Amino acid sequence: MFAGTLTRNVETAAAQYTGMIHSTRFDIAIQLETRPKMSARSPDFDVTAVNKSGRKVRIGTAWNETGNTSGNPYISMQIDVGLGPFRVNAVQTKEARAAQSGEFEIIPLVSNGLMKSGSISGELTAMDADNAFTGYIANMMFDLEFMLIENSYKSEETHPDYRIEVSSPRGTPIRVGSAWMAKSSRTGNDYLSLLINTPDGDLRVNAVQNEEQRGGQTFSIIPFIDSGEQPQDAGAGLSLVA
């Protein structure tokens, strides 16, 4: 079970809402930050928090909603702090609505469906030399900084274009995954598909550019959604060429 509070901030604040969410295993401060909408059903907010390394990470998304029967506004959130996804709603009491207060109560949402986790944040930046990228991927339980190094052993189309490396405490490069250049069959935009071995297991993500990033050197890392566009051998493991 989960509980919490959410407060609407003044319009000049960086985050539209701030709050706390609680369970028997954690107490986490959260923020809801406005994000660009790609469609009518795209999330209205990113839900962010600060992990143990002090980095702000996205732990979920949120939507402005209106009750079908009551007509009252509320906020629906999908959140994962590394323990599995869960859904909660932020609602107002009758008294809070009457007082036009910005105070909401966070309550669990009972759902019959299962959802995939979206509790990761990350960025990838193209370097000026060596056809390489530097980036990070993080959630509330791990925080990895890594590099994409061109795979000089690539000899077949399905082999990865890059190896993903992190550094040991002594600076030794350690391969933790593979990456492929790809092109969306739907939009025609280029993106990178990554397979990374994290402390929580293998993780598949895509590095894409939104409208503001397109043409630049920065990519946003987002959860992988199987749309049939994944390179053929993207799940073949972490061997040298596949």
Image (cartoon, grey):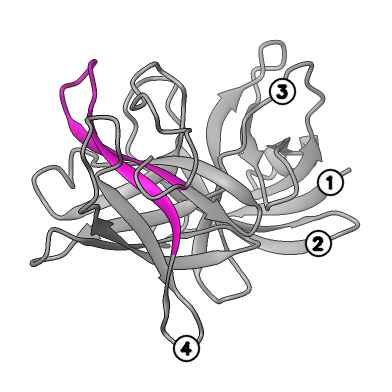
Q: Position of residue 97 (x, y in %)?
A: 69, 38
N-term-proximal mark, 3 vs 1: 1
Q: CA distance from mark 3 to mark 1?
A: 17 Å
Q: Position of residue 163 (x, y in %)?
A: 33, 54
Q: Residue at x 78, y 21 (%)?
A: 111
Q: Position of residue 107 (x, y in %)?
A: 80, 39
The mark found on residue 170 in the picture is 4
- Work out whether residue 141 or residue 183 is closer to the camera in this orientation and state it: 183
Q: Which residues are magenta?
A: 175-195
Task: Judge depth for marks 3 and 1 and give the one in front.
Answer: 3
Query: From this viewpoint, which residue is outermost toward the bottom?
Result: 170
Q: Amino acid at mark 1?
A: Phe
What residue did someone put label 3 on? 114
What residue did someone put label 1 on? 2
Q: CA distance from mark 2 to mark 1?
A: 10 Å
Q: Neighbour class for label 3 at 10 Å: few (<14), some, many (≥20)?
A: few
Q: Is residue 83 above or below residue 158?
A: below
Quarter occupied by residue 135? bottom left
